[in-house]
Image (cartoon, rainbow, N blue to C red):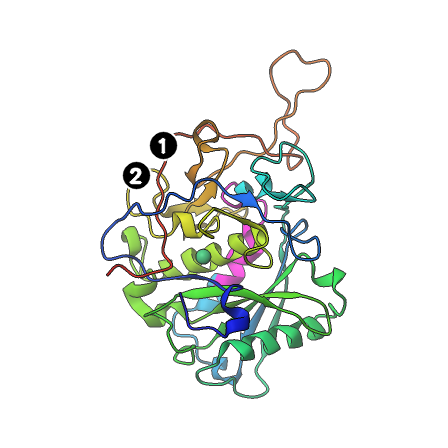
Amino acid sequence: MIHATVEDEQRVRGVAAPPTSERAVTSGGNLSYHGGTGGIGVETAPKIYLVLWGSQWTNNDPSGEESILNNFYGNVGGSNWSNSVTQYCQNVPTGTVYCNGAGTPAGNPHGVLAGIWYDNGAPAPSRPRQSRFASEAARAASHFGNTTASSNASVQYVIATATQNNSSGFGTQFCAYHSWTSSQYGNVAYTNLPYITDAGASCGANFNGLGAKAGITIVSGHEMAETMTDQFPGSGWTDSSGAENGDKCAWISSGQGASADVMLTNGTSVPVQSLWSNAFNSDAGGCVLTYPWARRPTSDESGDATVIAGVLAIRGPEGGDVRVREHRRAA
Ligand SMILES: [Zn+2]
C-alpha cells in the first residue's frame, strides 16, 4: 500500500511494481458490488481527461509518453480488451456478483478521451503529495466545465507528472494509483500517473518482452479499468480482500491472463495487462485480455446470433483461473 492520509487510505488503489517472482496469492474470489458512493459505482458513460501537469512537460518528454497516452486513451474505448468492464453495473443490491442485465452497466464506448489539458503555465510540485493531485483534479474539472456532481459521475481525470517530477514512493511502493476527492464540483475521480519509464523495470519496462515503454499502457490501462468499475475506490466492484479488476491480474507473466499486446480500435497494438472477469471459466472468474461484444438473437432466430455491437456483454469462451495481487512487493 502507499502512504496516504487517514482519510484517503481506504480510497486509494494503486498498482505496485512487478513481483520478483510470479505468485498466485489472493483467494478473494469474484468481484462483487459494494453499493457505490452516492449511487455511483461504475462509469456508465466513461470519459477520460488527461492532464499533463506542470511546465516541466515543456519540450521534455523523452519516452514520448504524451503521444502514447493520447493514442491509448483515444482508441481504447470500444476495444475487446476494455469490454470486460461492461459485465459490472450499478443500481443493483450490495453483494451482487453477476449483473445479468440488471442495473446500469459500465460502458465501453468509442471516444472515451474527452480532452487533454496542457497545464503548463507554472511548474507542478516536484514531489507532489496526494492532496495536490486531488486539488489538480478539481482544477481540471473546472477547466473542462464539469462543475456539477452529475457531470463528474462518469469521468476520470488522469494527472500525468513529467519525467523526474513524480510522487515519492513511485517505483518502490507504487507505479500509479487512483483515488477520488470531494470538491465543490461533486466527487471527482482521479489517477496519479507518474512518468512510468522513470521507474524502469520496476514499473513494467520490458515486462514479458513487451518493450521498454510497455509499462506506460500496462499501468495506465490498469488504473483506467479499475476506475471504470470502482469509480470511488472500495464502493464499486472489488473482491472480498478489496482487490479490483486490475489488481487481481497485475504482472502476470505467463499462462492465462499474461500481459500481452492487444489491438485498439484504430488498429494499433499496445501492451496491456489482463482484467478480471467474473464470467470467466463458467463464472469461476479469471483474468482475460478479451471479452466479447453482445450477440443478441433476434426474435425470429432460433439459435444463431445476430451481432448488435455494444448493446450488452455476454460471457466469453474462457478457461483457467490465475490470480495474483500486487499491492505489496514481494518480500
Ligand atoms: Zn490497482
Q: Is residue 166 visible?
A: yes
Q: Which mark is residue 320?
A: 1
* Residue 234: x %, y % from top left: 54, 56
Image point (48%, 55%), residue name? 221
On screen, 291 above or below 173? above
Q: Main secondary structure of the magenta part?
A: helix
Rendered image quadrant of residue 87 = top right
Closer to us: mark 1 or mark 2?
1
Residue at 47%, 53% in the rendered image: 242
- In depth, the one of 229 and 288 nearer the eye is 229
Q: Residue at the spot x=50%, y=75% of the render? A: 5
Residue toward you, 207 or 40: 40
Q: Which mark is residue 16?
A: none
Q: Which residues are magenta?
A: 69-82
Q: Position of residue 121 (x, y in %)?
A: 59, 86
Does the closest atom of ligand 1 sit within 8 Å of the Cβ of label 2?
no
Q: Does the magenta segment cover residue 158?
A: no
- Answer with left or right where residue 108 lies relative to residue 104: left
Q: Amino acid at mark 1?
A: Gly
Kind of residue indicated by mark 2: Gly
Residue 204's spot in the image, x, y percent? 33, 60
Q: Residue at x 69, y 75 (%)?
A: 143
Q: CA distance from mark 1 to mark 2?
A: 9 Å
Query: Hey, which residue is sitting farthest bottom in the picture?
Result: 122
Q: Quadrant of the C terminus?
A: bottom left
- SS at badge 2: loop
Residue 79 seen in the current view: no
Q: Earlier in the sequence, mark 1 or mark 2?
A: 2
Q: Are marks 1 and 2 in contact (CB under 8 Å)?
A: yes
Q: Which residue is mark 2?
A: 255
